[in-house]
Amino acid sequence: MSSFLSDLRHAVRVLTGNPGFTTVAVGALALGIGANAAIFSVVNAVLLAPLPYPNSDRIMRIERGFKGSDGGGGSVSIPKYMAWKKANQTFAAMALYDFSGPGMNLGSGDRPQQIRGIHVSSEYFQVFGVTPSFGRTFLAEEDQPNRGKAAVLSNDLWRTRFGSNPSLVGNPILLGGDPYTVVGILPASFHSDPPADVFIPMQADPESTNQGHYLLAAGLLKPGATLDSAKANMAVAGEQFRGANPKWMDKSETVSVIPLRDAVVGDVRLALLILVGAVGFVLLIACANVANLLLARAAGRQREIAIRTAIGASRGDLIRQLLTESVLLSAIGGVLGLLIGAWSVPLLLAVSPGDLPRINAEDHVSSAISALDWHVLAFTSAIALLTGVLFGLLPALRISKLDVNSVLKEASGRSGTGLRHNRMRSVLVAAEMALAVILVVGAGLMIRTFAGLRSVQPGFDPRGVITMQTSLSGGRYDSTANAANMIRQVVDRIEALPGVRAAAASVAVPVDSLGLDLPFNIEGRPPEKGSLYNGDELWRFGSPHYFSALRVPLLKGRVFDQRDTGNSARVLIVNEAFAKKYWPKGDPIGQRITIGKGLGPQFEDPAREIVGIMGDIRENGLKRGEQPVMYVPQSQITDGLTKLANSVIPLSWIVQTAGDQSSLSAAIQHEIQSVDSQLAASKIRTMDQVISDSTARQNFNMLLLTIFAGLALLLAAIGIYGLMSYTVEQRTQEIGIRMALGASRGDMLQLVVRQGMLLTGIGVVIGLAASFGLNRLLADLLFGVKATDPITYAAVAAILVSVALLATYIPARRATRIDPLVALRYE
């Protein structure tokens, strides 16, 4: 201990005696460690922290899987869930619930409150390990079809809307205009996924034939049961269902069981891991910079080390002392890095996309995130210690084995500090350049992706368009005629407003990534062998003026109008991609299609005639390209589909305006409530905001990678500048001799620049080769550009060479100004 304290005191004296060196080294480390702490805070909250439920490691998502695919089908149908539950042997409880509630209108009067509500089966609360603070959860009999209306409230809704009144249990509340008896209040510690304010019984029919996949399923493993045993059990259940229902489960479909945390995180895992790798590279570059500083400083300490060796210090003593200095540097850098990380986390969250799971996604439970979490503190401490050893060990080993006799015989401490001894520093600088190339190439590809997404035409004109949602749950609009009548009245009132050009209702807003698809058959065209349908494509319903509100071009035929009612001939409009796919050389106008036949009574729809072809709208996001889409009039869908849609998703409104959108938004909401005071509007956005939200995650990735690449480029430039400055200083006598013998200033400039650019060239070549392999990991995050894009690689190489040339030129110019007479006397 006394030796350690002595080493520590000496380290403090050394570092305080060299404030310039200490400031630069600590600053580089603080930036690298701070960036790592900030990103790890997000990674910890999203990927590592357990879900906020008891036994969360035993909660599994059960869903459709497909052979040859890493992902699952996500949603499930009621018949499949019932079959899995019947064959269950490994789950203590299984639950069926909505993937995202439709929203529910709470209360009555002029200003109802739209709250988040989901349907859940009776074992939902057992799966997620929650016991109510007051009352109870649903009884099994309450979860049977048509068994009354019960509700369980979240603690937040109970406190904010009902004043924490414990006598609320047993009394009714109005949801969607219907009375529901409150049977329980959940504790404040419970946060459901997806988030909900109120829970009502699923009441799924065990004998249902509805084959639509629009629900989620989860299960709690029995004590001692494993993920593998659950997979085996559900695989058997899947085969049993296939045997009984071969037409509803093809040969490629399986049953997938995955930890709920993995299902919640989804496709964001890859992007976060790439960002972790990026900040790791930044830290490595910072370490290489500090190691270079230590190597340079070690040259001036050779006599000190030689004297300490001569008076009895062992090599181990010297290494321990030098490592103590390095670890002290990294500890100071770690503390400052943690402060930088704590300061950066709020900024990181401010620019993060609104759909980051477990942080700010509307359809996932959120986690608290802080750079002062003990996991983050432990991580920061670990990387601070690791970096201290990493950048300190090499200089310590190198200087501790010097030749004591030769050093002590020299007249100055500059012995042995020529080009040969700069070799290791040159290797470190080349490594910095290589790492910087990898990061800048990654950032370049993401910038190209950002530019590509900005240039994509969504297939409609978003200018002046306002969107919002209203919940139709509750039963009053479960018939298509009632819903169509309400929509017609609302649209008429909205279109009468000054500044409104067109208005319509739809099942979804374009580019909002609602994966709603249905299978279909084309009249007179038999399906391929082994298939029930001719195809399965995106399906949307909308009211008249839907296409005019979005200014989508009509390519052929006609659009929906007031003639298309529940009593008129059934019609259908397809987009250009649909027409090209199914009639590549023909004309689809006049062809007849039957949609969803056999999926269940809700989907039983008569044949429809194609009456129009529209331009392609990117319904499922800008990255998805032009997908085939079928559009049907809202007034012509079945009552069963209307009821199903109302129970699962809210109705969307799309309004094309020519005036001030903020003032018109309030007027539009007023007109909706003039028709029905129970219809509260929510999620009010302009279409420009909708498009921006759809690309927010790619923009976030691009922004962070660009910041990290900029840091890497700066640190690499500092590294090569430092090396060349040190080289010029160490070779002052050599340069003076060369100039005394007739070398020109241009020759000296070329000598120094050549050395710097040689290192740059080696680093750039290695970095480009590494990028070619590593940046393939970015492939799933890119759009409009390949991971091996030659233009990006060439541009990055040019940028790195230019920056390195500037960093090399400055010390090279200094070399040309050396006075030979002064240089010959230089020690």
Image (spheres, rainbow, N blue to C red):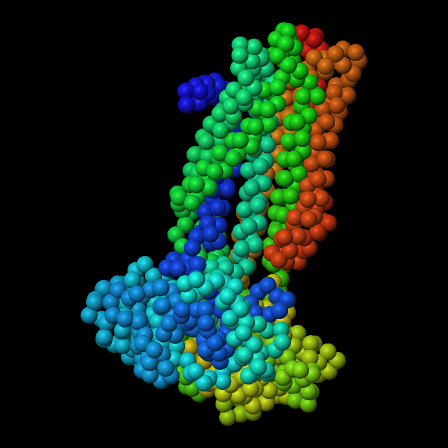
Q: Residue furthest left?
A: 167
Q: Is residue 157 left or right of residue 519?
A: left
Horizontal and vertical percent position of residue 681? 39, 70
- Quadrant of the frame with the C terminus: top right
Q: Is residue 401 left or right of residue 389?
A: right
Q: Is residue 251 visible?
A: yes
Horizontal and vertical percent position of residue 438? 64, 43
Relative depth, front residue between 378 and 46: 378
Q: Residue at x 75, y 24 (%)?
A: 750
Q: Is residue 669 visible?
A: no
Horizontal and vertical percent position of residue 387? 53, 34
Relative depth, front residue between 334 and 327: 327
From the viewer's perspective, is residue 674 above or below residue 25?
Answer: below
Q: Residue at x 68, y 55 (%)?
A: 786
Relative depth, front residue between 317 and 503: 317
- Quadrant of the frame with the N terminus: top left
How many discs mark residues in the rendered view?
Answer: 0
Q: Residue furthest front?
A: 224
From the viewer's perspective, is residue 338 above or below residue 633?
Answer: above
Q: Residue furthest right?
A: 742
Horizontal and vertical percent position of residue 347? 45, 46
Q: Residue at x 25, y 70 (%)?
A: 135
Displayed quadrant of residue 726 = top right
Q: Residue at x 63, y 39 (%)?
A: 436
